[in-house]
């Protein structure tokens, strides 16, 4: 347990956690073990439902989380029509009464309504104030402000600007996602008006993370300057590490792929094929040694220096936070 006393914010009150930190849901990376350790460390964590191939596997994970977690945990659901498993995944979340859901993409209205009827909190990913206003009108429990330093599908605005814009259109609690790799940056986000943070990339290189040793070591040896955007994985801009393989293959879709993604007749099919192909390459790189290394990560890998347990990553973050506020001298 950290020597830092509780950091009381709206997020810690909503979830009943000691520290306002969400171990962010990461495609292929987040697993049950990581989330259990996060709850032991006084924070919370979430897993993408899409990390499980079948509903049976998903329910088994939910059962283990309910049994072994020391605190609340969440599930990330893709809310748009491309997620053909959405109804099934939501049903499982309701059956197991998860503590909160994080929605990404699409219209989360049905998710919010059904979750609130079952006493489940809902936080919604947003990247600008336009979508933020639309989502706020649906009355979720908070907004996750995905800024331009987030890993994966990042936003375009800085954390400060995005939080300010969201505060101008919404009274909901705001959780900042992206750009935190140390305790000083945690303090900065809280000072900007966030009630907590969602932090992912620094947890990729943890002992509990299921990804390959190569992927973990890449997070140690590469830095913020090595993070680039690609549209080749899902059709939308996504952050990855600029490995020699990425430099060789490029980060932009081919002319044919780009044309199909913009053509009204073929757009939907093209996006599905791009997503399927991209996720397949990510999965191959994440769990095996291959020169075709396409590793998703955000700029906060800048602060990853060694492979540590989840608990230690949290302790280091809180110790740095303690120094930033003058609570810890050395």
Image (cartoon, rainbow, N blue to C red):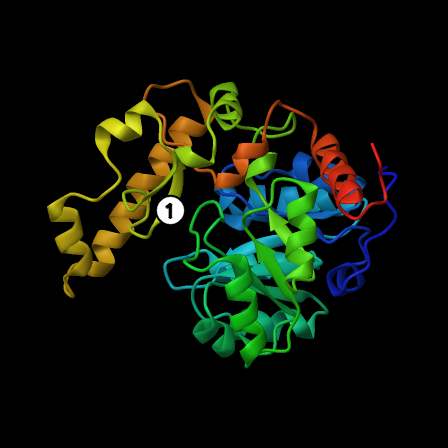
Q: Is residue 208 left or right of residue 214?
A: right
Q: Nearer the viewer, residue 210 or 42?
A: 42
Q: Is residue 284 left or right of residue 187?
A: left
Residue 81: image x %, image y %? 38, 64
Q: Which residue is mark 1?
A: 238
Residue 157: image x %, image y %? 45, 60
Q: Secondary structure at mark 1?
A: strand
Q: Quadrant of the N terminus?
A: top right
**Relative height, residue 284 to residue 17 (above, below):** above
Crowding at mark 1 (Cα within 10 Å: few <14, some 14-19, many 20+): many
Q: Quadrant of residue 189?
A: bottom right
Residue 246: image x %, image y %? 30, 30
Q: Is residue 286 left or right of residue 249?
A: right
Q: Is residue 251 left or right of residue 88?
A: left
Q: Residue at x 16, y 66 (%)?
A: 264
Asked if residue 227 can be seen in this view, the reply is yes
**Relative height, residue 38 to residue 104 (above, below):** above
Residue 148: image x %, image y %? 45, 53
Q: Quadrant of residue 290?
A: top left
Q: Residue at x 22, y 31 (%)?
A: 249
Q: Quadrant of the C terminus?
A: top right
């Amino acid at each position: 347990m950290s020597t830092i006393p509780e950091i009381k914010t709206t997020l810690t009150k909503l979830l009943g956690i000691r520290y306002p930190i969400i171990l962010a849901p990461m495609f292929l990376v987040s697993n049950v073990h990581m989330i259990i350790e996060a709850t032991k460390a006084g924070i919370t964590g979430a897993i993408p439902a899409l990390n499980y191939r079948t509903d049976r596997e998903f329910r088994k994970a939910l059962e283990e989380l309910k049994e072994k977690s020391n605190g609340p945990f969440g599930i990330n659901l893709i809310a748009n029509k491309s997620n053909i498993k959405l109804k099934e995944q939501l049903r499982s979340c309701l059956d197991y009464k998860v503590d909160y859901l994080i929605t990404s993409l699409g219209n989360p209205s049905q998710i919010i309504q059904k979750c609130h009827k079952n006493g489940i909190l809902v936080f919604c990913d947003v990247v600008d104030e336009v979508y933020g206003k639309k989502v706020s009108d649906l009355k979720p429990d908070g907004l996750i402000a995905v800024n331009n330093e987030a890993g994966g599908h990042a936003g375009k605005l800085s954390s400060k600007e995005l939080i300010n814009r969201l505060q101008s259109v919404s009274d909901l609690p705001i959780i900042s996602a992206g750009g935190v790799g140390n305790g000083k940056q945690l303090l900065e986000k809280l000072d900007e008006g966030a009630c907590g943070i969602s932090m992912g990339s620094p947890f990729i290189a943890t002992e509990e993370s299921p990804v390959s040793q190569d992927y973990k070591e890449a997070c140690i040896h590469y830095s913020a300057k090595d993070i680039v955007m690609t549209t080749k994985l899902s059709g939308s801009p996504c952050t990855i590490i600029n490995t020699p393989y990425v430099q060789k293959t490029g980060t932009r879709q081919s002319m044919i792929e780009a044309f199909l993604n913009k053509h009204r007749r073929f757009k939907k099919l093209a996006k599905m094929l791009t997503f399927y192909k991209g996720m397949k390459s990510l999965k191959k790189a994440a769990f095996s040694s291959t020169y075709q290394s396409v590793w998703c990560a955000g700029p906060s890998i800048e602060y990853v220096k060694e492979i540590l347990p989840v608990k230690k990553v949290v302790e280091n973050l809180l110790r740095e936070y303690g120094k930033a506020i003058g609570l810890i001298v050395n």
